[in-house]
Amino acid sequence: QSALTQPASVSGSPGQSITISCTGTSSDVGVYNYVSWYQQHPGKAPKLMIYDVSNRPSGVSNRFSGSKSGNTASLTISGLQAEDEADYYCSSYTSSSTYVFGTGTKVTVL
Amino acid sequence: EVQLVESGGGLVQPGGSLRLSCAASGFTFSSYWMHWVRQAPGKGLVWVSRINSDGSTTTYADSVKGRFTISRDNAKNTLYLQMNSLRAEDTAVYYCAREVLRSSGSYHFDYWGQGTLVTVSS
């Protein structure tokens, strides 16, 4: 199972919006609405930010939103804040009944 | 409060073995499928293995199949990963992760441990 493809880095100024893409295949992202997104600060464990493409867990800011079209899912962070600077990983359930993660995107707040 | 605490990492020589543990608390451990996910230094997350709630079904990534064994002790609320024939490329932080309840109709990881570092080097 190959990793989902994400841009290596995305940056934006405080207050701006950024979007991170996550491209998979017809065996994962394209066939299931089970795409999730995780935020990881340096030296910390991943934290669930979005599940089932566009659902936010309790306690996650509504500045985070998700969507999907075909084999590509996206995470949008609006009103970018300094604390959003972190690595972000997408993940999808797969037709093999396993999970695959994205390559990861480093978000920099300028 | 849900807690997952990994232990057992350390330095091991190539070809050696190590057993990781993940102690769970704050939830009904026996109801959840559990996973191991690893992250090599400076690299991304990679799914490693999963076990169903009663321990009867396991699945592995091709990269560890035949070398790693996932298991659980529901009486002790503990998840394990037995790692044999370790290679340099197995060097990583290993996280245990809880999969959301299967009955929810969703598939994702809702809680993660803090990870334990495994270094394979001579």
Image: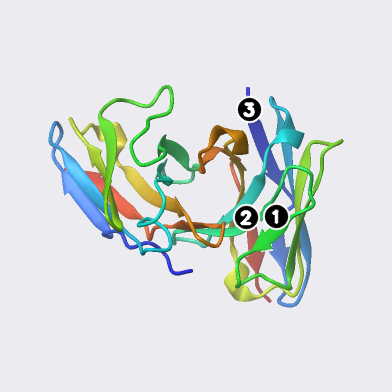
Question: A43 above or below B60?
Answer: above
Q: Quadrant of residue B83?
A: bottom right
* Among the two numbered marks 2 and 1 on one chain, the one whose residue lies closer to the N terminus: 1
In percent of width and height, residue B17 lies at 78, 67
Disc ID at residue B9: 1
In percent of width and height, residue A26 lies at 37, 63
**Tag nearer the camera, 1 or 3:** 3
Respond whether the residues carrying marks 1 and 3 are from the same subunit. yes
In percent of width and height, residue A25 lies at 36, 64
Which chain is mark 2 on?
A: B
Asked if residue B6 can be seen in this view, the reply is yes
Which chain is mark 3 on?
A: B
Please identify the quadrant where the C terminus of chain B is shown: bottom right
Q: Nearer the viewer, residue B109 or A9?
A: B109
In percent of width and height, residue A18 lies at 18, 43
Q: Marks 1/3: CA distance? A: 22 Å
- Give SS at disc 1: loop
According to the picture, the residue beneath numbered tag 2 turns out to be B117
- Give SS at disc 3: loop
Q: Residues within 10 Å of mark 1 (few under 14, many from 20)?
A: some
* Among the two numbered marks 3 and 2 on one chain, the one whose residue lies closer to the N terminus: 3
Q: Residues within 10 Å of mark 2 (few under 14, many from 20)?
A: many
Q: Amino acid at mark 2?
A: Leu
**Tag nearer the camera, 3 or 2:** 3
- Give SS at disc 2: strand
Q: Quadrant of residue B97?
A: top right
At 34% from the left and 44% from the top, the residue drawn is A86
Q: Marks 3/2: CA distance? A: 22 Å
According to the picture, the residue beneath numbered tag 3 turns out to be B2
* Among the two numbered marks 1 and 3 on one chain, the one whose residue lies closer to the N terminus: 3
